[in-house]
Amino acid sequence: MNKILKIILIIFFSFFYFISSFSIAEEKIKIGLLVPITGTNKQLGQQIIKSSRIALKDLNTKKIEIYLKNTNSNPNQALKAALELKEAGIKIVIGPVFYKSLEFLGEVKEITFLSLTNKTLDLPDNVISTGVNAVSQLNAIKKFIEKNEIQKTILLTPKVDYENEIRKAVKQSKIKILKYHIYDTEPTKLTAQIEKITNYKIRKQNLKDEIKRVENSDLIDKEKQLEKLNKKYTIGKVNFNSVIISDFDESLKSVITSLLYTDVSPKNKYIITFNQWFDKSLMREKNIQPIYYPSIDKENLENFKRKFLKEFNENPNYLSLLSYDLVGLTYYLAIKDNLTDLNKIFKKKNVFKGKIGIFEIENNKINHILNFYEISENQLKKIF
């Protein structure tokens, strides 16, 4: 009788285990996607949706279900959409895209939001910034500076809304900065500030004084020395060997042009900037080269752009590549750790290699391990 009972119990538990395993295997990974479908940023939202579709196709799995909701780039609409995702049992959401849309999402504590913003200050506890943030960029710049044994680096930041982000990133990256300068983007004020930073007026006066001294001298090679001096713009050294400029587009070019005006040339001082997303206009500006900056992997970006173009006959925004990776990242974490306890997943150290590059996850933060590039002689070169 005992043997029969044992056999029945073994069959029962084996069947129960089989049913449970089947249920777990069939359990879907639910991912929310919170993007602007309407409003001024709807085109960006559509591209993020398309890149998510490519990610699903490449993952080739039926385990993922994506629940799409509209933010309309509005914090109130983002909250409404997030509450609807919560009712659907969603635990993890890709989005929102913009920092302003995060304002009320701390109220939806049951969801972890992987926002595409690169801002890291004053985020709700349940929001993780996944954009290419200032810390990631300064970490790569720090690596370049140490590799080249560069001493005396100054940092220039425009008087804009991300100034405090840069200050925080300097502390977190532990990069050695000799001086930190905030400059005004208005051209006249900018020029005056760069003159002060580079001691231009003193160096200019040094040249005038030296020309006058030689002119009044009885030197045998006076004419030759004067010829050399008249080819110079200043005399005297600046108190730095490299400049980091946390600026972009035409404003960045204005700063470098001001440095050139004050006789600080990229030929003898390292000019380093933040991620320029391979801005082609910099390739045409030979007078501001060489110039250095961190960025995502260019080869991966080009491969993704070709794939996106083939699939949808349009070029993707850079955030599209990031959203593509976030679908893959969420799937990877779900398979590796299960998404039931998101707090633990994003607090412990994880490394994920995506198309954009390598994600480092720890203490509810995501940093990117970036590559480093040089533009010189109108050519782009990968340094590391």
Image: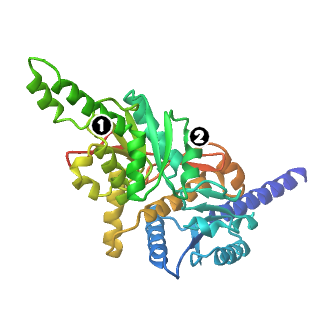
Residue at 34% over, 37% down: 270
Q: State the image quarter where residue 26 is shown.
A: bottom right
Q: CA distance from mark 1 to mark 2?
A: 38 Å
Q: Secondary structure at mark 2?
A: helix
Q: Secondary structure at mark 1?
A: helix
Let me know if residue 384 appears in the view.
no
Q: Which mark is residue 53?
A: none
Q: Nearest the camera: 187 or 96?
A: 187
The quadrant of the image that shows the C terminus is top left
Q: Position of residue 362 (x, y in %)?
A: 62, 45
Q: Nearest the camera: 191 or 11?
A: 191
Q: Position of residue 79 (x, y in %)?
A: 69, 74
* Labels 1 and 2 touching (C-beta < 8 A): no
Residue at 47% over, 70% down: 48
Residue position marked by numbered label 2 in the rendering:
172
- Label 2 amino acid? Gln
Q: Residues within 10 Å of mark 1 (few under 14, many from 20)?
A: some
Residue position marked by numbered label 1 in the rendering:
204
Up/down of 236 relative to 339, above or below: above
- Label 1 amino acid? Lys
